Amino acid sequence: MLTYPIIDPVALSLGPVKIHWYGLMYLIGIGAAWFLLSLRVTKENSPIKPEALEDLIFYAAMGVILGGRIGYALFYNFDRLIDDPLMLIRIWQGGMSFHGGFLGVMLAMWIFARKHNSTLFTMADFLMPVVPLGLLAGRIGNFINAELWGRTTDVSWAFIFPGAGFEPRHPSQLYEAGLEGIVLFLILWIYSLKPRPYRAISGLFALFYGIFRFIVEFYRVPDEHLGYLALDWLTMGQILSMPLILLGTFLLVLAYRPKKEA
């Protein structure tokens, strides 16, 4: 069993202003994505000009934040949303959903594409290789906050998380950081080094994220107020990941289907 590193969730205090590690992780993820996109945008096949990159990052960041918050309320706290609609703006109380953030980013890319006379998946294919960096940073933030911990276990790398009782648990946040962050980033970045068919990169992202999230959910404790939704093992995260797996498969089939000759 490993010793959990107690870290103050507040990274920096400036008088009444407190900067939390979780929020800082979002900034780090966005900054890393911005840096790598600034490399991609200089290539000949870049779908946008370098001067439009800042605009793209802004749209994507708004999609993540607004979509993630709204998705959390709809998918995980709908009853609370009905009773207290203002919970949506109380972001400091926590609560973000990847699946909502994904939908928010796709909507943002559609709006951005229309503005720049392009298409949704042209922008999504350009953006998706760097999205796992944000996921990696976010999961590290979850680990620092000692939240979204895993199920009890006797593996040697288990942790006893504050607020989770005295039993050792899977560090499921780190599993997600590894699979959804590092592994998915390597898959997409290497795959995108060469020109790929339209929709293929977006499809690969959706497929592998859905698979990785579905697997990790077996080691993660579901939200207490939701629990297991079916068969004593199916979680909300798995239910929301299944459409992503189907979407990714569908996009890849479309991308690689034989072209009809004129």
Image (cartoon, helix red, strand yellow):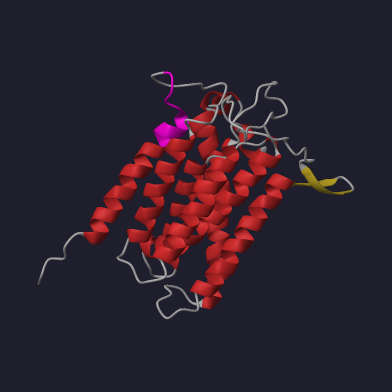
Image position, residue 93 (x, y; %): 69, 35
Q: Residue furthest top?
A: 232
Q: Quadrant of residue 77?
A: top right
Whether residue 233 is in magenta: the answer is yes
Q: Is 63 displayed left or right of 5 in the figure?
A: left
Image position, residue 172 (x, y; %): 57, 36
Image position, residue 185 (x, y; %): 49, 57
Could one spot residue 128 in this view of the protein?
Answer: no
Answer above or below: position of 224 versus 175: above
Q: Quadrant of residue 109?
A: bottom left
Q: Quadrant for the C terminus, please.
A: bottom left
Answer above or below: position of 231 versus 32: above
Q: Residue at x 62, y 33 (%)?
A: 156
The magenta segment: 232-240
Q: Residue at x 41, y 58 (%)?
A: 110
Image position, residue 241 (x, y; %): 41, 38
Q: Residue furthest front?
A: 156
Depth check: give the residue in front, 70 or 13: 13
Depth check: give the residue in front, 193 or 255: 193
Q: Residue at x 54, y 31 (%)?
A: 220
Could one spot residue 225 in this view of the protein?
Answer: yes
Q: Is 15 displayed left or right of 216 in the figure?
A: right
Q: Residue furthest left?
A: 262
Q: Is 35 displayed left or right of 46 in the figure?
A: right
Q: Quadrant for the N terminus, please.
A: top right
Answer above or below: position of 62 versus 160: below
Q: Is 166 displayed left or right of 238 in the figure?
A: right
